[in-house]
Image (tube, rainbow, N blue to C red):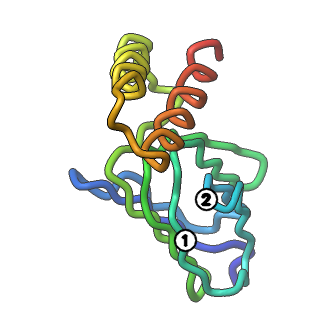
Amino acid sequence: MSEGFNIEIVNPERSFLIKENVSEVVVPAFEGEMGFLKDHISIISFLKPGIIKVFTGSDEESFYVEDGIVEFKDNSLSILTSHVFNIKDADKNQINSSIEDAEKELAKDEIDDQKKFLLNNKVEVLKSLKFN
């Protein structure tokens, strides 16, 4: 019997990550960081910009996610997102460009509170990546 559970991260281009026997996953849900272990209760939640951490044994992988939906059911975690990348492969120019674009959006007068929250969160997370 398996010690862990399965994870799949999918974006519009492809299945970004498929992994078996994962011991823990932490996602940036709207409610706060949400951790998943084997036999977690079934749940569906929305993601905000942040870092997904995937633990397999003593290995840890980190991914930036823009938004999305997370579902855990029958020891299988599915994450559907519009934008995701592996932090170890991050392009600093692309990160800087994304920060600039988000800051330009934040400067607009007609921005609503929810969009402002998400953009501020995105800027904060991306700025933290620049210095890793």
Residue 22 at x, y = what percent? 65, 63
Q: Where 20 sits versus 113, above or below?
A: below
Residue found 68% across the figure and 56% down from its top: 26
Residue 112 at x, y = what percent? 41, 45
Task: Compare residues 72 and 50 and report the one nearer the observer.
Answer: 50
Sequence-wise, the earlier of marks 1 and 2 is 2
**Amino acid type at mark 1:** Ser
Q: Where 8 sits versus 65, above or below?
A: below
Residue that mark 2 sits on:
29
Residue 9 at x, y = what percent? 43, 59
Residue found 62% across the figure and 52% down from its top: 28
Classify mark 2: residues with Cα within 10 Å, few (<14), some (14-19) or many (20+). many
Q: Which image quadrant is residue 81 in? A: bottom left
Residue that mark 1 sits on:
45
Residue at far left of view: 13
Q: Where 28 sits versus 97, above or below?
A: below
Whether tag 1 and tag 2 are in contact, CB under 8 A, the answer is yes
Residue at far front of view: 109
Residue 31 at x, y = what percent? 67, 62
Element type where label 2 sits in the image: strand
